[in-house]
Image (cartoon, rainbow, N blue to C red):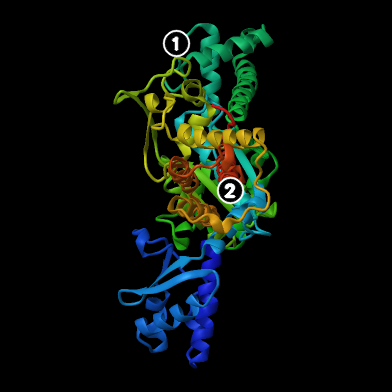
Amino acid sequence: MTPADLAALIRSIAVDVLNARGLDASVLPEEITVERPRNPEHGDYATNIALQVAKRVGVVPRDLATWLVAELAANEGIAEATIAGPGFVNIRLAAAAQGEVVARILEAGETFGNSDIYAGKTVNLEFVSANPTGPIHLGGTRWAAVGDALGRILQANGAAVTREYYFNDHGGQIDRFARSLMAAAKGEPTPEDGYGGGYIQEIAQAVLEAHPDALELPVTECQEVFRANGVEMMFSHIRSSLHEFGTDFDVYFHENSLFESGAVERAIATLKENGNLYESEGAWWLKSSEFGDDKDRVVIKSDGQAAYIAGDIAYLVDKFERGHDLAIYMLGADHHGYIARLKAAAAALGYAPERVEVLIGQMVNLVREGKAIRMSKRAGTVITLDDLVESIGVDGARYSMIRSSVDSSLDIDLALWESQSSDNPVYYVQYGHARLSSIMRKAADIGITAENPDLSLLTHDREGDLIRTLGEFPAVVKAAAELREPHRVARYAEELAAVFHRFYDNCQILPRGEEEKQPVFTARLALAMATRQVLANDLRLLGVSAPERM
């Protein structure tokens, strides 16, 4: 019996209890809160439902709790139900009912933890979207890991997810990039507003090798050669880095296509027609302040050029016209203003603003021995995704980025993540999976299987702790999807690994000699198999490998 099963049972009993006394059962919430008590001596689970609804139906909370306890205690899956304080209900499960979690995990396999809460919902998930003017820095690396994990988690909850990279190939930053390449090719200093670093030299040389006569062309044509080829080479490197990092995209959307296809003009025409765009001082302004933004935004500047938001508006229309129900943007710390801006744009276009979500990620710093590391030899001024992977590997890099809430800045201690010890979170979790895999191999060697286990034999406290932790996995995955917080899945993996290691230290899993006939070992092997499955499922949602040997 998982926490969700218990919550459903409590609600069903509460409905019967209230109806039997002529009380209004409609006041019951759809989902009953079930939690594990801080003190395990109080029981396996606790609920405050009596305190929540007693006043609404006109009874004393403790009286309602008494009625609930009487019915719960009569259920064969409940070993004990008691009242605590003013009306809390503490519950201890019967061993057989608790063991059902193990059987369910083994039956469900890779799908355990999945749900259908977003079934039929299409989500456009845009993340990374770094300008093709340099390698991906640590902020983009964070989104590459977190965004990919969020996509996996949403899919596990039934959503159809399109992972999208917005390719910024339009505007002034691309011109500065091209001029920087030209300067490097000529052996001139980097322009004051340009891009530096070893990668500029590398790309400039590659362009010259492909187009030996580029520098002999007129300036405008020369710049176009470096722009077109340089952007493609840089973006090819970005795609390769992301692929090696385990992050791939379904769509690479080119910003320039919005202007070439007329999408920007059409979006502006729509806003003019519906009255949400007005002219003032020679420019055209979006009435964004009427839709929750802090001010109106210039869409067409007085010189007739489109402001940056014009592309954002057209891109938003494109996302919804492609049939997406929800557009999630994952942006850097300097884009906080985009939350109100994009929601206002959606409302002005006639879309429900709640169909737009903007997640803001904070900065990432690397430290070693307490000192910040700030220089990348190749990029010149920043630490890149490639630098991080080279230092701590793909698994370490992904896990270190995902395990903390993106709402807070992140310091990554390289010495910690390079270590092969229990202090390293990803090593600790992966070691748990490897240890479990070793147990499976040893069981096969001695001919022990988990076939037809008597799971009611799992009565040791450490067995109970492990089973209850396993049972929480579906709720963790669901919460991670609903709250857009993949770090919950990572932290759960660490908790599960810790609970498993304690179980391993206290409960002999495989028999020795004459002990092989004892059925408890079959049950414990089944529990170990279930734990291995959940750890593997968890790591897969994070895009982190589950090694069988370490």
Q: Which mark is residue 125?
A: none
Q: Position of residue 63 (x, y in %)?
A: 37, 85
Asked whether residue 161 appears in the rendered view, the answer is: no
- Which of these two is toward me, 302 or 454? 454
Which of the 4 image quarters holds residue 190? top left
Identify the residue at image location x=48%, y=16%: 378
- Would you name the residue on which mark 1 appears? 189
Instruction: Specify few, some or many for label 2: CA neighbours under 10 Å numbering under 14, 14-19, or 20 or more.
Output: few
Work out whether 446 lies above or below 205: below
- Would you name the residue on which mark 2 appears? 518
Q: Amino acid at mark 2?
A: Gln
Q: Quadrant of the N terminus?
A: bottom right
Q: Quadrant of the C terminus?
A: top right
Q: Judging from the image, what secondary structure is the residue with disc 1 in?
A: loop
Instruction: Specify few, some or many for label 1: CA neighbours under 10 Å numbering under 14, 14-19, or 20 or more.
Output: few
Disc 2 versus disc 1: distance between alpha carbons? 78 Å
Identify the residue at image location x=65%, y=58%: 121
Please tell me how many numbered marks the rendered image carries.
2
Q: Residue furthest bottom?
A: 22
> Seen in the image, is 286 located left or right of residue 374?
right
- Which of these two is toward me, 283 or 232? 232
Q: Amino acid at mark 1?
A: Pro
Q: Position of residue 398 (x, y in %)?
A: 51, 34
- Which of these two is toward me, 448 or 202? 448
Which of the 4 image quarters holds residue 413? top left
Identify the residue at image location x=42%, y=45%: 405
Work out whether 322 lies above or below 180: below
Work out whether 145 lies above or below 351: above
Q: Position of residue 261 (x, y in %)?
A: 70, 42
Asked whether residue 262 appears in the rendered view, the answer is: yes
Q: Judging from the image, what secondary structure is the residue with disc 2 in?
A: loop
Identify the residue at image location x=59%, y=35%: 437
